[in-house]
Image (spheres, rainbow, N blue to C red):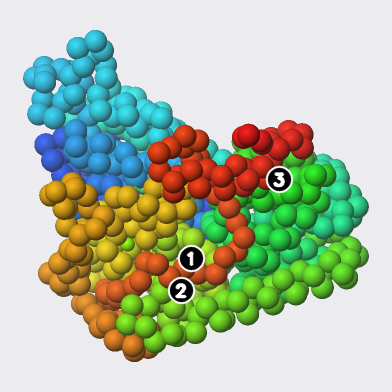
Amino acid sequence: MTTRKMTVSQAIVEFLAHQYTVDGNYRERTIPGVFGIFGHGNVAGIGQALKQFSVENPSLMPYYQARNEQAMVHESSAFARMKRRRATFACTASVGPGATNMLTGAAVATTNRLPVLLLPSDTFANRASDPVLQQLEMPHDATLSVNDAFKPLSRFFDRVQRPEQLFSALLSAMRVLTDPVETGAVTIALPEDVQAEIIEVPEEFLADREWHIRRPRPDAGLTADVARIIRSSKKPMIIAGGGIIYSDAHAELQTLVEATGIPVGTSQAGVGSLNWDHPQCQGAVGATGTTGANRLAKDADVIIGIGTRYSDFTTASRTAFQNPNVRFININIASFDAFKHGSALPVVADARETIKELINELKGYSVASDYAANAAAEKKQWDATVDAAFVDKKLALPSQTEIIHAVQSASDATDTVICAAGSLPGDLHKLWRVRSPMGYHVEYAFSCMGYEIAAGLGAARAGAMPIVMVGDGSYLMMHTELVSAVAEGLKFIVVLIQNHGYASIGHLSESIGSQRFGTQYRFRDVQTNSFDDGEKLPVDLAANAASLGIDVIRIEQTNSAIADLHIAVKKAKSSSKATLIHINSDPLLYPPSGEGWWDVPIAPISKLESTQGAYKNYQEAIKLQRPLLGNGSKDLE
Ligand SMILES: Cc1ncc(C[n+]2csc(CCOP(=O)(O)OP(=O)(O)O)c2C)c(N)n1
Ligand SMILES: [Mg+2]
């Protein structure tokens, strides 16, 4: 066996440069590059290896700079999502804070089931100079380092304490990254001394290697059972989740629903599984759903969940499905999700393969004509409601609904709207009229403020034309990657909505009786120690963005704000560079209601009248919450 003498880091970089994902006709690099921020923990190890490798192979393993470790993980997640989980980046960080900055990114990746490869540096394995700068040092456990905090957030974790552990660590990492069930954050902690140690590496380890994405078919006979249940149902409905997108099952889903007439509601991750104007597409379902999808879900006797995790937003905290005899058929590659809901028929298999079989099994079947007519009428009604809400009221401080319409109507079908937190995700879920499978990218498993701009960059790297929509709160939490966009000439558009605080949590706070406490950005009143009643702050986020070197368009507060925004988006699209558009909005103007609900528990005893009132409403609403098993209802009397 021929071997090569290299450092552990040199072996890592060369190994990663030779991994390929294969999925049908698709064959591309699994890890096409590395993000990194260097410190003493990785500059001499992975840093040296990347430099050396880039000299010998200039474009094989490009290094990209980030400004914040959390952001580089978000970039990787967003890239992976746009690549349908078939590629991602590696992220190298120094010991201590560099490593822990990646924790939130790890959680985003794992909750969204997106692959990211994290290479946090670790303190010395040989302990010779302990405690090194930034070492945790726990008196009761000498094996602990801050990187142990990655364990609950990672789908695979390893620490390379000895050079020869590298082989199994990296092969396991690749297996998990490319496994559609297990994928998520993969963390390989690399002690700073081990990174620079010598290892004899078998050539076999460094050769090209292919990782095939599993697309398992359902068990024999299972789709026949599913078809029998659907044929005997009166009101079947499909809930389309992210699994449709990841398994590239759009065309098959369309064929299935066109043949059968079964209506479809989409979760956040499932938006794009049908175009908005497809006759069977009822749009968003659940807490942030449309009236059409929610009314159909309420009465449905069979729910066919395809590739959905059934988050509380999708199930409206288990109030969405009110038919006492409702049955769930859960088609999911992960048994964990397929077995959700008590009376479910689990189909543990790839979405596309299963839908293909179902198309066959359901030949000749279609829903009853009165059910189809009802669904069509619901769709028409919701679309008319949205059309009315989209009309420009010519306000100097427009509603977010009008802003979404201005952006939407200036965008192209294949552009990708990106968002994660605030009032935008709910509004986009209801209102964005998606026109392509990858046209909608809202991170709503972790709903992480600060994901948006970094994700825009990650999506741009995947070849998308991203339009990031972000609130002032999220912007303030993390906008640092605008600098990276400038440095690399990456093109994307950011629409920054300034409403001086948290419109979303403010609204929620009001509805649960907490009177918008602490949700606005205002001067602190020194007398009352309150931030709630003061003047708005004189922050100028447009100037902030301009100071980072990005082109900025300011929408002035006039009655042509919405028209100006539309023109600005068009202009930004025609520019070769990244552009940020700044617009002010009224946080108190809401989109039309879709009749969804969300469980946020309320204090049963309170001295505030607002809370007492909210609790009364809560007692009523919670009665609709369905238990996991049986048909009981919750009574809080
Ligand atoms: C990192 C993080 N911290 C806190 C939250 C809880 N949270 C959800 S939305 C929100 C406010 C978002 O404000 P902004 O971006 O201005 O959007 P708006 O609500 O005004 O639409 C907060 C604090 C979160 N989702 N993520
Ligand atoms: Mg805001």
* Three-letter residue code for mark 3: Asn
Residue type at tag 2: Thr
Whether residue 197 appears in this view of the structure is no
Say which mark, if any, is on residue 401: 2
Q: Answer yes or no: do the residues labelled 2 and 1 have beta carbons within 8 Å?
A: yes
Q: Secondary structure at mark 2?
A: helix
Residue 622: x and y, percent? Answer: 62, 43
Reading the image, the residue beneath label 3 is 330
Residue 569, quarter of the rendered image: bottom left
Quadrant of the image occupied by residue 568: bottom left
How far apart are the alpha carbons under marks 3 and 2? 33 Å
In primary-sequence order, the first of circles 2 and 1 is 2
Quadrant of the frame with the N terminus: top left
In primary-sequence order, the first of circles 1 and 3 is: 3
* Residue 485 in the image, given as x and y percentages of width and height: 24, 66
Residue in the picture at 71% in, 61% down? 295
Give the alpha-carbon distance from disc 1 to disc 3, as whole Å: 27 Å
What residue does disc 1 label? Answer: 427
Left or right, 595 with reference to 14: right
Q: Quadrant of residue 566?
A: bottom left
